[in-house]
Amino acid sequence: MSPEPMTAVRQALLSVRGVSKSFGAVRALTGVDLDVHSGEVVALVGDNGAGKSTLIKILAGVHRPDTGSIAFDGRPVTINTTTEARDLGIATVYQDLALCDNLDVVANLWLGRELHENGVLQKIAMEQRSWQLLRELNARIPSVRATVSTLSGGQRQTVAIARSLIGEPSVVMLDEPTAALSVAQSAEVLNLIERLRERGLGVVLISHNIADVQAVADRIVVLRLGRNNGEFRAGDTTNEAIIAAITGATDYSRR
Amino acid sequence: MGRSATVKAVASRNPTGGSQTSLREANRARIVESLQRHGHLTQVELAGVTGLSAATVSNIVGELATLGVITTSTTTRSGRRAVEVTLARQSGLVAGLHFSSRHLRVAIADVDRTVVAEHHAPLAHDHKYDRELDRATLLLSDMAESLDTGLSELLAVGMALPVPVDAATGIVATPGLLRGWDGVPVADALGERLQLPAFVDTEANLGGLAEARYGAARGALGAAYLRIGYSIGGGLLIAGSPYHGVHGRAGQIGHVTIDENGPICRCGNRGCLETLAGGPALLDLFREDTRFQRLRDIVLRAEEGDAGARRAIADAGRHIGIAAASLANLFDPELIVVGGELAEAGELLLAPMRHALERAAPAGGSHLPELVQSTLGERAELLGCLALAIDNVAASGRLPASTVTTIDPRRTG
């Protein structure tokens, strides 16, 4: 439970240094650092308004930071648009999932990126690759031809995560993936996160559920009032220590 | 080499000979597993989920239906006729819950040991009894619902914990090892939530029980089961039944002293086996390397040929072997079965263990116990939980009369 950022032998896949962002008079982020390695689940935790979503949106290309730098695979990058983030290999699954309820699983997975050849949709190829992907993820989806409206919350989350993988990203960011899910469905999503890290992806997980975070995360990064307030190894720390950092009972910030 | 050695080790224990037969067996198992995961599926969905061709699925479904393993019914999907496939089950269901240090496994089976629903989830390293039992209760009731039944239809539940449990009080027998569960009458707490008779034992005892009934230790007069994972535990099996000791603490091989001046253990002693070969100790060796976050990472890297990972597993095996040799000298078992997360490394772990065992044996030791990998793998303890529940149902005389024994591919035994 060292408060210093941990040194890593390997180069981080995604490295954020000293990022600040203001919205008018509101300082949303002040000098925030974040590292994500491949095959690592990093949980980003903090109270409402701590700056988690702002940070995610900066990495997703929605907002641009005022100051600070982002490096991807060791190269300094600027992420100006969501398309640039996607092209770099950063995929984001937002809380609202943004699925089309009236379309089936295959159509949702490939939406906007449909496979085609000479202007003809490759329906069979898309269906086969959908099955293959869901099998690799060990997903509990009974059929890829089911419309999304017939799926449970956990299955929808699974489809949304699977969709983010279609573009072969190297970092996946999940915003509150287990909020509003039943116990069984949360378990599915947590298992899915384990699959993602086994595939060598870097995963950034935003969650308010400390037990879920402790179950799957390798490192836990705490934000408080827009600043870093501690970084923990999941295997060494306790619920209490994390909550103390979230609430500010312990102060690790480097002001 | 690591992976192929493991595969070979598995293959040599596999009684099915011809590749055609074993392929068929594997396909059957895939279909049954899919049904356990999803409840019921149409043949078309089964083909999608398993990746088998529609013709193969149709053939196997036909065979399994004839054997009485599954039942089929006609239904409609998107306006078309479809054949819906469900696992056939005997009346009378029991549940099993395996809480290990970092993982939860849950299953519902009929009293004939057919697993009809199964779930699993990762756990926080310092999980606490109230949250986990509440969660498990919700999970079980969800699973029962997917089987069109309810918790009230269950007859009993068996549970495994990664710490010794005192059978008389139902309380964790060695405080400090799993702090979130200390001082709680665990079986009562679970039974109250589920409104069912609940039974608890140590995971090593139940893993051993399952291996003795359905796995590597079948028919052994005396056997020991070592569970090597985030924690290290042992189960002593005498004529197929776990020996608990007076306070439920028998077989605590993880807390045998290896180094008097070693690091302080979570149990309060120094230099216990766990401080040298337990999961946290092994992961600490790779503290600066983000590729090693879980025990599974060490096993995978070792199989890929990473020298450091192989060395860490070999050293763990050597230390465990020293403790296992003392166990062998005291208990004189016919065989020692090795399970748990690290046992997935197969011979990478077992060979150094065997070497240490031989070295520490008395001169002219011709009666060394055989050292083998668990045949039930990661589900051993869960199957033990189900066996514990079924045994208690049988003992209370509430077993339905229909428990016939047939050859059934759904059985892991």
Image: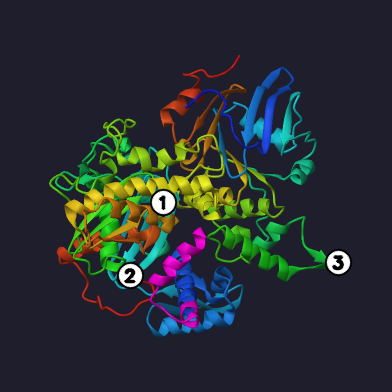
Name the magenta segment's main secondary structure.
helix
Q: Is residue B241 left or right of residue B258?
A: left
Q: CA distance from mark 2 to mark 1?
A: 22 Å
Dot 3, crowdedness within 10 Å: few (<14), some or many (≥20)?
A: few
Image: A64 above or below B400: above
Residue range highlighted in magenta: B1-23
Viewer-nearest of discs 3 and 1: 1
Nearer the N terminus, badge 2 or badge 1?
1
Residue plotted at (48% across, 71% down): B30
Residue kind at label 1, given as amino acid type? Leu
- Measured as percent of width and height from the top left, residue B356 is found at 32, 51
x 32%, y 30%: residue: B264
Q: Are marks 3 and 2 on the same chain?
A: no
In this view, the residue in front, B147 or A71, is A71
Q: Which residue is mark 1?
A: B342
Question: Which residue type does callout 2 highlight?
Answer: Gly
Relative to B165, is A6 on the left or the right?
A: right
Which residue position holds label 2?
A: B413
Q: Disc 3 designates what residue?
A: A119
Q: Secondary structure at mark 2?
A: loop
Q: Secondary structure at mark 1?
A: helix
Location of residue A116 in the rendering, given as x and y in whole percent from the top left corner: 81, 65
